[in-house]
Image: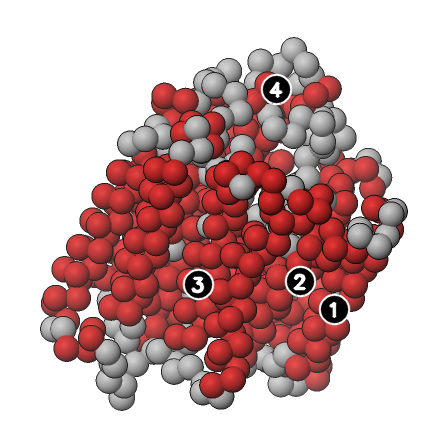
Amino acid sequence: MRRPLSGWSAAWPASWRWWWLVVFGLASQALYLHFFLRPYPLLAYYAVPLLDLGKLTDRSHEAARDFAVAFLLLFGICYAAYVLCRGRSSWKGLLVVLLFTFLCGLALVLLYPITAADVFEYVAYARITVDHGANPHLYRPLDFPDDPFVRYSAWPHITSPYGPLWTYVSVPLAVLSGPSLLSYLLLFKALALAVHLVNSGLIYSILRHWRPTYALAGTVLYAWNPLVLFESAGGAHNDVVVMLPVLLAVYLFVRGHYSLAVVVSALSCLVKMPMVIVVPLFVVGGWHALSEEKNRMAAVARGVGLAIVTVVLLHLPLWDGLGSLGWLARESLFTSSFATVAVLTLRHWVEDAELARSVVRSAALGVFGLFYVWRLLTLRGETRQFLEGLFWTVLVFLCVAVLWFQPWYVVWVVALGALVPSVGTARLTMLFSYSATWNYMVYIFFLLWFFPYMIAGNSLGMNLTAVLLIFGPPLAYVTWQARSCRRSPVGDG
């Protein structure tokens, strides 16, 4: 029996819902066009190296206001669409959601990447592989000074920090792009949008299988999330590619293909290595989901064995010792995290900077390690409990163990939060993804507006401001939920 809807959306006739969804989609499209594509078109700026929102606007108060207002309105529309879709699931609604996901994403594909230059790094590493016939995990863009695109790289002095699977994905894009920088940018951004649409379809399919009345709401929560759209189609970040194997593994898990789910989940860490944390969760979840001991042992052995073989085989063509693991270089970087604030505070008493970083890094990983072990010990094979375990593990990892925080990492949390049929989880996911956008306000605008304060204590003021704005609202919400002792409604009725 279908549970009645609560709130203002319950009184609307079913036929009205989809028209309101169209209105919300049109409003979102108008905001993306007005606040993003119109002032920052890719075609006008792509040929100028190392531009960003601050340089394009001279860090004006008007540009900061527009940036903040745009995201506030877009998140408001996204949440309204989520409330509208709760308790309803239809192909008509899904088509509307996917149509406007594509249209809004298309506007962002044509947007210059105003907040990060990572797509230019993708171009540089792809050219190392295809045009120079070298290994981007061993060679840097700076090693090819005659390459015409090296001047667009913001990090020319490091090797690729990504896994081998991302290198393989980049190769056909480089071949198709030829010598055109614009073609490179459009193809990488189009890839991100296409994967975002596939992820949206996977989320709908997963929820349709086990919680059909929440399927459309969960899909909207991810597909229309402004941060996810902005970072994928707008910034071309490969985090949507990171989450594709995870979502596909969840799809397999809820259908009982536990061994294959382990293998597929391992592909995510071949794009970004830190996502290896999800693989043991699929192993333990599959173990508990299987009832017979013999089946458990065979399934776990088969899944783990195939996962190891897959990871090794995909690493082999690019392997040349630990130097091939470029992501290890990021372990020495700290920014916009609790660990960063701890390091900068500790420096007041510890002169050795590396010692301070080492102590804080060990403490952060230790705290997450304790949580991770507890999560593995309490994880079960029941679908909802398993999905909640995935969500909270990745969320805590991002808040505690990620020392170099960037807003696009929140894509991981949004993709998993969309699978949990809970209003509380949806609100937390939405709030965190919104507060993450304030990282850009700090580093693009506030840093120079309040320069003396921001560099006080060796950038302590800057990082403390970023941490409070990014993590403060979601932590306050979690604290309020815990103190209220009220369980969030399932939200599938």
- Give the answer, above or below, for where 95 lies relative to 128: below
CA distance for labels 3 and 2: 18 Å
Q: Secondary structure at mark 3?
A: helix
In the rendering, at what x and y percent does residue 330 appear?
72, 44
User: Are dots 1 and 2 in contact, CB under 8 Å?
Assistant: yes
The residue labelled by disc 2 is 400
For marks 1 and 4, give the one nearer the viewer. Answer: 1
For marks 2 and 4, give the one nearer the viewer. Answer: 2
Front residue (pair 34, 324): 34
The residue labelled by disc 4 is 150
**Nearer the N terminus, badge 1 or badge 4?**
4
In which quadrant of the rendered image does the C terminus lie? Answer: bottom left
CA distance for labels 1 and 2: 8 Å
User: Are dots 3 and 1 in contact, CB under 8 Å?
Assistant: no
In which quadrant of the rendered image does the N terminus lie? Answer: bottom left
Front residue (pair 395, 482): 482
Disc 4 marks which amino acid? Val
For marks 3 and 4, give the one nearer the viewer. Answer: 3
